[in-house]
Image (cartoon, rainbow, N blue to C red):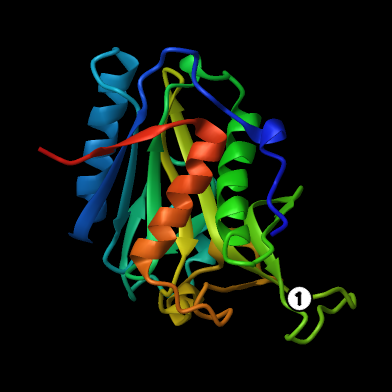
Amino acid sequence: MNRLDTHETQFFAHPGSPPVRWRIAAGLIPYPDAVRLMETEAQRIALGEADELVWLLEHPPLYTAGTSAKPEDLVAPDRFEVHTTGRGGEYTYHGPGQRVAYVMLDLKRRRQDVRAFVSALEAVIIDTLASMNVTGERREDRVGVWVRRPDKPPLADGSVAEDKIAAIGIRLRKWVSFHGLALNVDPDLEHFSGIVPCGVQAHGVTSLLDLGLPIAMHEADIRLREAFENVFGPTRDDRLI
């Protein structure tokens, strides 16, 4: 299935560390509410008051602007709410049908290496896709995970067209991460036309459904959790109290 060699990407916590809490939200979570919870949880994790957390959710349709966002890349500023956020990266879209995974891990318990951490998150996505016989790939000049599209017209330079299927944007505070990744399961891809996604104009955006895979969200979650555990170690079920 073209899975990555997890030995090269493993980001396990120190021996004896508790499993990562794995929480799945019901319904659509407003973006400001998600940011408030992330910041609270990240602070608790940094203080040693809580175990690490991965929070899976969907947002209502909205755009977010990362720390490198350019105003001209917001093509349709009145289409949806636009939220300025402290994560790295540029503009992206979130909405129903997209699985967002907010990853709150203490890199002091793992590796204090931001580049390796981003690579590990990419590995989770690539391994998730591989479990569905989709080949996701990294690109040195573009963060995120990409899928070759030989079924589309080639690019101007003659190379094979590529579409982005997952975005990554993180922030660290006291070496605890928050924000995370977004995998396109079956969102409305037309909504990406209101921005230049991640500042990349030469390539498109795709989803599992667009690739001919009508995967239910709960199935995508199962595969995502398996891939996460291969890279970051064990998880345990958690719920918001």
Residue with the mark numbered 1: 161
Q: Quadrant of the N terminus?
A: bottom right
Q: How many marks?
A: 1
Residue plotted at (49% across, 20% down)? 13
The residue most toward the right is 158
Q: Return the x and y of residue 182 as percentages of the image width and height.
A: 46, 56
**Quadrant assignment, res 217:** bottom left
Whether 49 is drawn above or below 229: the answer is: above
Observer-nearest of 41 and 7? 7
170 vs 146: above or below: above
Q: Quadrant of the C terminus?
A: top left
SS state under label 1? loop
111 or 172: nearer the viewer:
111
Q: Residue at x 27, y 42 (%)?
A: 35
Badge 1: how crowded within 10 Å, few (<14), some, or many (20+)?
Answer: some
Rendered residue at 38%/71% (across/down): 216
Residue type indicated by callout 1: Ala
| Residue 159 visible, this angle | yes
Residue 20 spot, x, y in % from top left: 36, 30
* Residue 51, image x, y percentages: 30, 23
- Examine the rendered structure and indicate whether residue 94 appears above or below residue 230: below
